Image (tube, coloured by chain):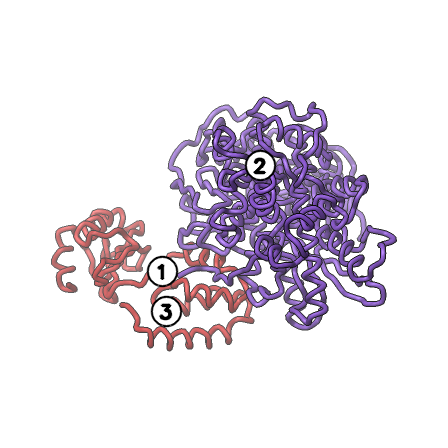
Amino acid sequence: MNNVTLTIDGIQVTVPADYTILEAAREANINIPTLCYLKDVQQIGACRMCLVEVVGGRALQAACVSPVSEGMVVKTNTEKIRKSRKTILELLLSNHNRECTSCVRSANCELQALCREYGVDDYPYDGEMSETTIDEMSPSIVRDNSKCISCRRCIATCTKIQKIGAIGVSKRGINTTVGSIFGRSLVDSPCVNCGQCILACPVGALHEKESISDVWAALHDPDKYVVVQPAPAVRVTIGEEFGLPMGTVATGKLATALHRMGFDKVFDTDFGADLTIMEEGNELIERISNGGTLPMITSCSPGWVKYCETFYPEFIPNLSSCKSPHEMAGAVIKSYFAEKEGIDPAKIYVVSVMPCTAKKFEAKREELSNGGLADVDAVITVRELARMIKSAGIDFARLPDGDFDKLCGESTGAGVIFGATGGVMEAALRTVYEKVTGKELADVNFHEVRGIEGIKEAEIDLDGKKITVAVAHGTGNASELLEAVKRGEKEYTFIEIMGCPGGCVTGGGTPIVCSKDLQYVNPKVERAKGLYAEDEGKPKRKSHENEEIKALYDNYLGEVGGHKAHELLHTHYVARVKYTR
Amino acid sequence: MALTPKEIEAKTEQLKAFIAEHKDVDGPLMPIMQEAQNLFGYLSLDTQELIADSLGIPVTDVYGVATFYAQFSLKPKGDNVVSVCTGTACYVKGAQAVLDKVVEILGIAPGETTDDGKFTIQETRCLGCCGLAPVMTINETVYGRLTPADIKGILEKYQ
């Protein structure tokens, strides 16, 4: 690609010729404000916040869709531009629910931040407002259109990145609505609950269905024995909510904070992840040796599972029958742990802290229970946990390191990396290799399945027997991969699919990164680095070496993949239609 | 008019044939939706899903277009479609009072259909006969120089 040189606000910038003015300006540390622009997701020039003056041009131009050219002279900071941006903000506010103090995105709202920057101190255009519709029926996602600014970032994410298309724009003018068709709830749409729309939203129009008050109520109930388990990705994302740099490994602080909040036991979903590898690895080996359905596809991600059930039901037999790690851990806590400690399982309340909104839906699936007791009682996102920690008066960033409780709290590096795309695959390969070959792995690092490429492939040599594997993250990439498999172009033994782009570290329940910052940092990369660093530092890095897992099988479950394991740790799936009639 | 299952089946086949002919032209969505509107008189979820799946786009895109343009309807229309012009000329000559009277007598809002399926009211823009303002049409018949007092008698003819 050729480079071009242009001048922005008197600064000479040399950038590739296919850059937009916005990208060139950000390269030169000039911040042009945006609302509808979202890097790699949407550039449509709709909101007009990024208007700039191109010297010699007729009118102000939207920087996010204007290509650079050689010798171009751009001004981004003139009185005319500042005035027009302020007017745009005032117009947006004229049809916006301005209850900022009670808004979940207060202090993390792109509209609010811009209004402050541009000195919007009045509402000169108050008039007719759109009808308020709040959709709270989904177990995962709440949509409040009174806050929506119709930027369409959620739609672009759902349609272009995730290839789901559960939401779109309907009607026009003041009646313009973002949502599902026929005024339906998200719950009556093909929405897979991934929550990527929440991460895309610049304002408070989308947020998770909260369970904070349920969890506090359980913690304050003397008759309940409340157990918590945080997912792998939580330890490398929670720090951001407290001002720590992106990707900071905060495992010890997390354990301390959970203890201080008053949980009776602080266990770890990483333990459940190691357990998942035991069952899933065994399932893969059995499918390979007994002529079972292949490729086997992972089932840890509930967003992916619902996507499969809805869009690719023909692949349901390929889904591993394993429950996801926190569901396995929940099932074990309410059986093995309860029995060991002599606690009535009906009194145990299991809280999962997840980087995920789809886990809220998953926890309500009837099949994920034993003897009428749900494996998991409440799911909160990383953002919800951060708010609980703050309201509990816990100064997270300054906490000393603590540890998880014994019995279901130990984990290996294999369990840790579940949170990054390719992590489940790598963890499984570490165990499957040793089980199949009976030999010790010389190098536990499978670099070929790491990284953020949309679809990754590798050929793995199991001591002479070669298997091909693939990893996809984001349902859009999953769709591409499955189409190739359907056409017969690709043949694999084992596939890992995560519903969210980047895997769990950038799941719909993780801290929301401001769209401007996304120009400079990639949370998928930075947060995953934290997980791989933690894996690297663990004394044990293979799930089958986890002592507590060994004890669980020896003292309670019996055989891996045996009768009891099946009863507690495996599940089934249902084909779904996109729109119920 | 409610379509029988047999009619729906036949029209669906017609629509499928039309889609097959038009899906590869530039901008196929509008002509296909117009054909569907003509065939069925409205765009049901089934119809919209068929169009979306045939074109490889999400239903939300079809629905977005269907709700953007007034020419598309999401519900079956009544036996008689009462269209009151609220274009500029008719409006200054009192179209709003005419429309209000139609709404009052039929007990439904513009865009809605009576429970018995007899009437649909729709607001329309200029019909091109401003000399007769205010104007309304019922099906293909034009009624001009209306006053609210005329409405009851006219509607009774269609009861």
Q: Residue at x 21, y 51 (%)?
A: B103
- Quick check: marks 3 and 1 in contact, CB under 8 Å? no
Same chain for the residues under marks 2 and 3 in the image = no
Near mark 3 (Cα within 10 A), the count class, few <14, some 14-19 or many ≥20, is few
Q: Which mark is residue B41?
A: none
Locate residue A337 relative to residue A543 in the image: left or right: left
Position of residue B146 relative to residue A295, above or below, is: above
Q: Are marks 3 and 1 on the same chain?
A: yes
Could you tell me which residue is drawn at 49 percent across and 28 percent down? A220
In the rendered image, what is the letter of the chain coloured purple?
A
List the residue tagged with mark 2.
A227
Question: Label 1: chain?
Answer: B
Q: Which residue is mark 1?
A: B73
Residue B141 locus on image (x, y percent):
22, 65
Amino acid at the residue labelled 3:
Asn
Above or below residue A488? Residue A300 is above
Tag 1–tag 2 contact (CB < 8 Å): no
Left or right: A325 as drawn, with respect to A14: left
Check the rendered structure and report the hue given to chain B.
red
Q: Amino acid at mark 2?
A: Val
- Specify whether residue B112 is in view: yes
Which mark is drawn over residue B38? Answer: 3
Q: Compute the Cα span from label 2 to label 3.
A: 60 Å
Dot 1 surroundings within 10 Å: few (below 14), some, or many (20 or more)?
some
Secondary structure found at label 2: strand
Of A202 and A303, which appears nearest the observer? Answer: A303
Nearest-to-viewer mark from 2 and 3:
2
Q: Quadrant of the C terminus of chain A?
A: bottom left
Mark in front: 1 vs 2: 2
